[in-house]
Image: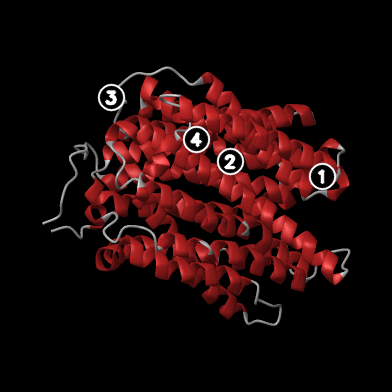
Amino acid sequence: MTRVSPDDPAPSRPPRLTALVVAAALFMQNMDSTVIATALPAVAAGFGADVVTLSLALTAYMLSLAVFIPASGWLADRFGARRVFQAAIVVFTLGSALCGLAPTLPFLVAARIVQGMGGALMVPVGRLVMLRSVPKSQLVNAMAWLSIPALIGPLIGPPVGGLIVTHVSWRWIFALNIPVGLIGLVLATRVIPETRGTASRRLDGPGLALSGLALAGIILGGELLTKPVLGVPAGLGVLAVGLAAGVVYLRHAWRSARPVLDLRLLSVPSFGLSVAAGTLFRIGVGAIPFLLPSMIQVGFGWSAAKAGLITFSASVGAIAMKMAAAPLLRRFGFRRLLVANGVASAASIGAMGLMGAAWPVWAMHLMLAVGGFFRSLQFTAFNTVAFADIRRHRTADATGFYSTAQQVSLTLGVVAAAGALEMAMRVSGHAHPAAGDFSAAFFAVTLVAALAVPVCLRLPADAGDAMAGRGG
């Protein structure tokens, strides 16, 4: 008989239905973040600016996420998870409409900040809805469905963006989110149950300001360091401000009873180790949407349409994973699976660096599909076991913390990939990246992802057994 946690909620809707509604909103956000990257040259031309300047549109979104994600748990406890999730969809959709109508570059940057405010709430509050409405014994299946957008969105975003920019206009990229957002709002209202925290608390305003400054400084500073044209001193200065704010926040967090990002949650083994290992793994995965399409187009000299058709193969493996996650976790448990699958997942990233223009297309499809399966399974396992021992009254704090770590690590993946690519070009003496430079960058981020494996070995042997249905 499967053990049931005393914290398990009584589900009012089928877990899969709830998961699909939340996943639809996350898909909208994940695809949007990669579609605009493909459209940057066209947007730059439309505003008479260069691509480097247009990167502000990407940075503004990431900074908005970094600042507002930590407040998501408090907002969900204060106003209710469903209400905040609905508001997040509305804000994100409104921001999308404003982006599409932007008459100037500053207006576009401001609209992306609005989008980021909505996106910052959709991810952690969506996960909180799952934790509060789905019994732990069914959470593996639900999280498997929820993990699919994390891989599909970044992979289909570039080809979709390329087609729209080529045949219509970059403004229609943002218009796509409007009908999806409206449908998601209706479904969220009808399907997602309302949940609240068990106790009210004040918002940690000083902590929110310090954590936002720290995360923004680290993200922006890292990005500036990958753009030599803007000057390394500027990047180091911004990074130093972020790190200093982080040190001050650490002191604040240890003295506060309920800080906005509670570091005491890391003392829960399944949560702390999942955050540490998941961060390393996501740095490697976060590099893929940046490196893979660019390698195929720039390194191989192929068209954007052909690149999109090839990179989409990974989503096939991600979809196949949803049927295999529960039986695999029930058979092997979280620790054994995270270790073995972690090796396979890291190897699948490195395998992309071995790809060449002479490879048969079918071999590329097969390799990417298998890799998509492994990486999606690893996402599902991390996203589930992290909350195995989190008590119900701490789920809001835990989801906010986890989502912040997740966003920062994926962003650092792009920064690490850009830095590794720049370093490879300097070593090879190339003014423009060649296929070998992309391969070197893939191998570098593979090493980072592989570092997650020894961390997973420290998980308790029975971690998440109740979730995996292994208890007696």
Q: CA distance from mark 1 to mark 4?
A: 30 Å
The residue type indicated by label 4 comes to Gly
Disc on res. 52: 1
The residue type indicated by label 1 comes to Val
Q: Earlier in the sequence, mark 3 or mark 2?
A: 2
From this viewpoint, is residue 179 visible? yes
| Residue at image coords 58%, 35% | 65
Q: Is residue 454 above or below residue 129?
A: below
- Density class for disc 4 (Cα within 10 Å; few <14, some 14-19, many ≥20) is many
Residue 164 point in image, percent of width and height: 68, 49
Residue 59 point in image, percent of width and height: 70, 39
Q: Residue furthest left?
A: 1
- The residue at which mark 3 appears reads as 198
- For marks 1 and 3, give the one nearer the viewer: 3
- Density class for disc 3 (Cα within 10 Å; few <14, some 14-19, many ≥20) is few
Q: CA distance from mark 1 to mark 2?
A: 25 Å
Q: CA distance from mark 3 to mark 2?
A: 38 Å
Residue 168 point in image, percent of width and height: 71, 46
Q: Is residue 331 above or below residue 122?
A: below
- For marks 4 and 3, give the one nearer the viewer: 3
The residue type indicated by label 3 comes to Thr
The residue type indicated by label 2 comes to Leu
Q: Earlier in the sequence, mark 1 or mark 3?
A: 1
Q: Earlier in the sequence, mark 4 or mark 3?
A: 4
- The residue at which mark 2 appears reads as 176
Judged from the image, the secondary structure of the residue bearing numbered disc 2 is loop
Judged from the image, the secondary structure of the residue bearing numbered disc 3 is loop
Q: Which of the pair 220/322 is nearer the observer?
A: 220
Q: Which of the pair 148/466 is nearer the observer?
A: 466
